[in-house]
Each structure stands twice: as C-alpha cells, then as structure tokens.
Amino acid sequence: MSFTQQNLQAIHQDMREAAQMWVSGLITDSEIADHFAKVAAKFKTVNHVLPGLIDPNTGLRYKREDHHEA
C-alpha cells in the first residue's frame, strides 16, 4: 500500500481532533502528549514518502531531499 495525500489528510484530521479536545479541556496534558508522540512515530515511518505531498495545515508541499555526494 502506498502512502497518499488522503492518508496524510487522515493523520491531520486526527491531530486536529486531539488538539481540539485538549483545548476544550476534554483530555489532559499527559494524554495529548502521548497522542502526539504516537503521531510523531507514524511520521518517522512515513517520512520518506512525504516529499511531493501537500501539508494539510499549511498548504506547503513537502520538499524532496537532494542527496549530493561530496
């Protein structure tokens, strides 16, 4: 399965919902910290497929990293 813009959008929506619950006082600091730690772990596993996709929060495109040999 390839990682798509829709997958990134789903992660973004999950982050928005958690942040809104935290702002609304529905979850604790510890709970939001745990949630975002799990999201960060997801990003580490998909980081190599993000280039070319558009960040849902900013509208900016993730850049491809150029690997130059010295």
Image (cartoon, rainbow, N blue to C red):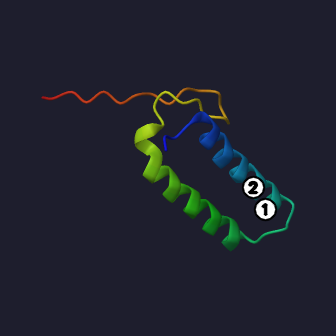
Image marks 1 and 2: residues in contact by CB distance under 8 Å = yes
Q: Residue at x 65, y 31 (%)?
A: 58
CA gap, disc 1 to disc 2? 5 Å
Mark number, residue 22? 1
User: Is residue 49 shown left or right of residue 23?
Assistant: left
Say which quarter of the image contains residue 8: top right
**Amino acid identity at mark 2:** Ala
Mark number, residue 19? 2
Above-or-below relation of 65 to 25:
above
Query: In this orientation, which residue lies closer to the viewer: 64 or 2?
Result: 2
Mark number, residue 10? none
Residue 29, x across and y down, in percent? 71, 69
Q: Secondary structure at mark 2?
A: helix
Say which quarter of the image contains residue 39: bottom right
**Amino acid identity at mark 1:** Trp
Q: Which quarter of the rendering shows the C terminus?
A: top left
